[in-house]
Image (cartoon, rainbow, N blue to C red):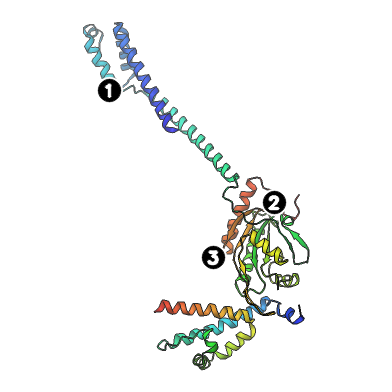
Amino acid sequence: MTSSTNTQSIPPSRSQRNICWKLRDEYFECLDNINNSNSGDKLIVDPVSVQDDEKMQKLVKKFNCWKKKEEYEKSCITSWVEYFNKRKQLEIKQRELLNK
Amino acid sequence: MLNSVVKRVGNSYLLYRNQYYLRNINTLSNKSQNFFNSRILNKNVTGSKVRYNNTSSQRQQQTKNGIEETIRDRYTVGPFNWKSFVLFIVTGAGLYFYFENEKKKVLEKRKEELANKSMGRPKVGGSFELINQDGKLVTDKDFLGKFLLVYFGFTHCPDICPEELDKMSKVIDIINNSEESGGGKVITPIFITCDPERDSVEVVRKYLKDFHKDMVGLTGSHEQVSKVAKSYRVYYSKPPKLQPGEEYLVDHSIFFYLMNPDGEFVDVYGKNLDAEQISTSIIRHAKDFIKKGGVMTTDGKKS
């Protein structure tokens, strides 16, 4: 094992976890606000699709969520970001399905 | 059981009645009418419900038919009197309580037999050999004497594991501070990693600093961990295609396993239960364990 993988494999501490969770919640709330405000618009923003959808990215920037996104991705480890995003995407899709 | 008793009581009653009839008919055929009628008269004097107005002069004129009639009259009322009524009630009540008691005894015996049989108890848990957070090799034998609450997880777990481990700490505090435990430590929280690749002894030790001070963190080789997970019927899986050094999450079952001081599986608690519900259940199991003569230690060593 090299030293770089060693430092990488140290899990976040409780305080780091709490910061990550807090920033995640703020970012996701921001996305919820976007989806709630443009109910007439068919574009539903979710944290997974936003990664490579320019239209969504514009919307996220317009609603001042971009900075939150960056902070969140910076303070949570990548596997967590991936996991939280997927879970949130699922939640949003489920809600859309129920609202139809 | 009760039916046969009722039948038996009924039969003896019929027998008693028949004998009564026979006796009276015998007295008739013996023509000892004087005796018979005086008995009836005596009854009248004592205030019985049987009504007869025979006087000694009428007695002489009574035909056999007339007497038979009076007997029939008597039996329309039945062999009822206060003595037999009280006897009936007392016997009935006595029999009732006797059989209720017997029934209870039988039920209790059956229940005990059922509880003692290991039939139906899932084969969860078993012997293991793992390394604790101080780098010491430990086995399941080292944990005998106390209840164990076992949780499988991994230190890089995003949110479920830390939440579950916090819940576990709460449960441990509730139980060890409860009246029932007498202020002693009766339960040990155990965290077993299902990610031995990243969760070295040091990583586990640092991770557990954020949780309950009594919590034991166990890790080991792939084989050791896979063996213990299998014995607890725990599923876990790592993503299949991984670049060296790439970050990943481990998918795993989320359960608390309660083991008794003899190392036997008792119960399992899912994520849906809160700390209070789990503690209540564990305290109930602990009382049951002691009631059955189980031995618990509070200082960590079996006395």
Tell me the quarter of the picture where residue B61 sits: top left
Quadrant in which the N terminus of chain A is drawn: bottom right
Which label is found at residue B272?
3
Q: Chain of mark 3?
A: B
**Residue in the foreground of this view, choosing between B154 and B54:** B154
Q: Position of residue B92 (x, y in %)?
A: 43, 30
Q: Position of residue A90 (x, y in %)?
A: 50, 77
Helix, strand or loop under label 1: helix
Q: Amino acid at mark 3?
A: Asn
Which label is found at residue A49?
none
How packed mark 1 is, by other alpha carbons closer than 10 Å (few <14, some 14-19, many 20 or more), is few
Look at mark 1 in the image and give the residue it sits on.
B76
Q: Earlier in the sequence, mark 2 or mark 1?
A: 1
* Residues at marks 3 and 1, CA–CA distance in whole angstroms: 70 Å
Helix, strand or loop under label 3: loop
Q: Earlier in the sequence, mark 3 or mark 2?
A: 3
Q: Position of residue B195 (x, y in %)?
A: 67, 70
Q: Amino acid at mark 1?
A: Thr
